[in-house]
Amino acid sequence: MQRQQVEDIAREAGKKIWEMYQGTPLEVETKADDSPVTQADLEANRIITLGLEKLGTTPILSEEALPDSKERLGWSEYWLVDPLDGTKGFIKRTGDFTVNIALIRNQKPVMGVIYVPKTEEMYSAELGSGAFKDGETMSNKRQGPPTVAVASKLHQGEEADWMNRIGIEDTVNVNSSLKLCWLAEGKADIYPRNKPTMEWDTGAGEIILTEAACQILSLPRLEAMPHNQEDLTNPGFIAFRSNLNFEASSDSIWPTLK
């Protein structure tokens, strides 16, 4: 099964990241967009690229090897890769970082794999086949009104005000795509985000969420997340378990809970 092959690729990259994480010192450079990059990002990208190329000729869109937009805008299928999601957490030694690989087909993710180097946990999903954690089926089975949110350790702000208004009582803080994974497995009810993310931050998590009885919708209109835009920056979004009912607000970017 191709999903298991992609899991193996993510695991190999993750093990290399963890090996480099335990070494010292970390070599950090700054990219043109002022975001940090380490040798671990680049080495993980090399491992993933070589692994995916062995699976066929599907093109690859990676944070660390961006193809020209004129080329990629015509793609109907491609791999979407963040070889080290949570580089800032990697540098700060939080342990909260992941390897993200998604297969996008006709503007929708149809497969996703997220590997956690610190814990060796593997989250994955394939369209119509369910979501899995370490090979076991998982789903968000929480009921009732939302009371627990998941949020970043490094980015907090206006989301907190909105969460208070809808009755959130507790917030679980973690970095990287682990937030999407934790929501999918039922550690929280909701994850709102109106700070910058990129398509490779959420592509794999999106299919894991949707196969685990959750949704992720863009703000403010609660529409499907875009893919392969000319500018790969995501809009704000809200991810939540599917048995909650939100509607777009006429006077705020944040939706109302029905």
Image (cartoon, helix red, strand yellow):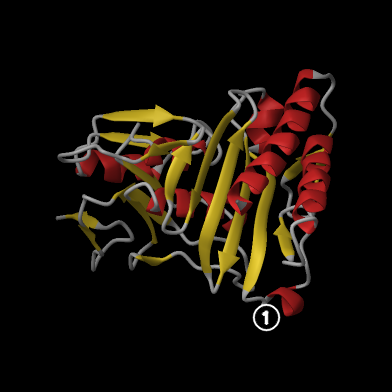
- Image coordinates for residue 19, horizontal then vertical, percent: 78, 24
Whether residue 252 sits left or right of residue 3 in the image: it is left
Identify the residue shown where x is 60% and y is 37%: 115
Quick one: SS at disc 1? Answer: loop
Q: Position of residue 227 (x, y in %)?
A: 55, 68
Residue 211 horizontal/vertical position (percent): 39, 51
Amino acid identity at mark 1: Gly
- Toward the front, the furthest residue is 1
Count of numbered tags: 1
Quarter residue 222 falls in: bottom left
Q: For this rendering, which residue is in front, 10 or 188?
A: 10
- Up/down of 119 relative to 113, above or below: above
* Mark 1 Cα shell of 10 Å, populated few (<14), some (14-19), many (≥20): few
Tell me the residue at 67%/49% (across/down).
82
Q: Is residue 84 visible?
A: no
Return the residue nearer the eye: 234 or 201. Answer: 201
In this view, 124 is above or below 111: above
Which residue sits at x=74%, y=49%?
Answer: 34
Residue 110 higher or lower than 186, as above or below: below
- Residue 199 visible in the snapshot: yes
Residue positioned 65% across, 58% down in the render: 80
Q: Provide the residue designation for mark 1.
A: 74
